[in-house]
Image (cartoon, helix red, strand yellow):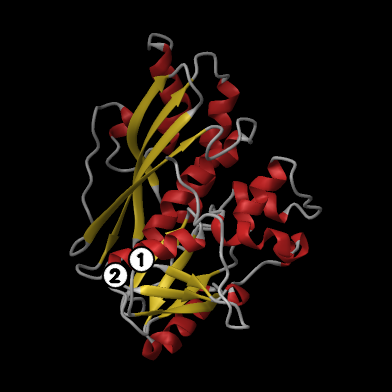
Amino acid sequence: MTDLPAEFQLIARHFRPLAGPGALELRDDAALLTPPPGRQLVLTVDAMVAGVHFLPDDPPDLVGRKLLRVNLSDLAAKGAVPLGYLMTISTPKGTPDAWFAGFAAGLARDQVEYGVTLLGGDTTSTPGPISLSLTIIGHVAPGTAVHRFGASAGDEIWVTGTIGDGALGLAVAQGRLADASGFLLDRYRLPQPRVGLALAGIASAAMDVSDGLVQDLGHICRASGLAAELRPDWVPLSDAARTAGPTWLETCLTGGDDYELLLAVPPNRVDALRTEAARAGITVTRVGHFHSGPAEVMLRLASGESLAVSKGGWSHF
């Protein structure tokens, strides 16, 4: 190993142990992947940049786990089974070896939990902050992937888990909110992708909530050509989020970083959703419905009044 250039020594030391079948021990410029027989591949990619998607002083093992999990969340929204991933890492020169060791250790832990392995990637230096990109590959039975489009008027809107914890966790990390239990900060740093929830034949449309519930619901509305009525009083909040108080409700609805699933479910499939969610050990909650009309989201209070929010969700531009 000592005869290798420094970059390849780093790869051999930290990332070769993560490589699985088809990765060729990361000794080549490409991987070989044979999909499971009779299955259709699903591919998705997400990037994370220090100071934007995670804080520069976040523990590197949690950064690695979050990078993998936000991509797993996209696969979960398709009802896909994870298979493997490609990864690109750009770090400033002088990044300590201990950072890479922690980052790789986090990936290794979640590879075991979610049944995926590293297939390949690239390492580069950058004058800017740490920038990470991961392309994950999964598989579904042909024709069963769930899309953003496909919702129909009358479909109910459902979400998994609780909403708003990630955005509140960021506020905790920035010193803007107290979090005695540490629950919110943990939810921000370590999302829980809902892999394993079988959506085929249940959800007519789905996506994960990454940029805020209101904004992501608007994406399904535009893709499906429908309007949506969202009931803020029905949106499931964790005990920690409720403790933060009603002044944080808009942040919960629009802040993002939830990585829960947002589902359109026909009324005659709701029982199937509840049964599947119980099997997977995932809570689900109805939060509204789709109806005919312009592609927009209306927030309707229990009183019948509408609730205005200052922004729909997170935007990079």
Task: Tell me: residue 317, above or below residue 163.
Answer: above
Q: Is residue 115 visible?
A: no
Report x, y in % for residue 41.
24, 56
Side of 183 where 210 appears, left or right:
left
Residue closest to the far top:
3
Report x, y in % for residue 266.
36, 84
The label on residue 104 is none
Q: Quadrant of the N terminus?
A: top left
Q: Amino acid at mark 1?
A: Ile
Using a 10 Å C-alpha cutoff, classify the residue at mark 2 as few (fewer than 14 neighbours), some (14 to 19) or many (20 or more).
some
- Residue beneath disc 1: 220
User: CB atoms at circles 2 and 1 under 8 Å apart?
Assistant: yes
Side of 164 where 67 appears, left or right:
left
Task: Tell me: residue 268, above or below residue 198.
Answer: below
Task: Tell me: residue 31, above or below residue 90.
Answer: below
Mark 2 lies on a secondary structure that is helix
From mark 2 to mark 1, how far is it between C-alphas?
A: 6 Å
- Of the pair 265 and 304, the residue shown nearer to us: 304
- Residue beneath disc 2: 224
Side of 140 where 208 appears, left or right:
right
Within the image, what quadrant is residue 60 found in?
A: top right
Q: Quadrant of the C terminus?
A: top left
- Of the pair 223 and 58, the residue shown nearer to us: 223
Within the image, what quadrant is residue 246 found in?
A: bottom right
Residue drawn at x 77%, y 52% as measured from the top left: 179
Q: Is residue 68 visible?
A: yes
Using a 10 Å C-alpha cutoff, classify the residue at mark 1 as few (fewer than 14 neighbours), some (14 to 19) or many (20 or more).
many
- Of the pair 16 and 134, the residue shown nearer to us: 134
Residue drawn at x 38%, y 11% as measured from the top left: 5
- Of the pair 118 and 221, the residue shown nearer to us: 221
Mark 1 lies on a secondary structure that is helix
Side of 140 where 123 appears, left or right:
right
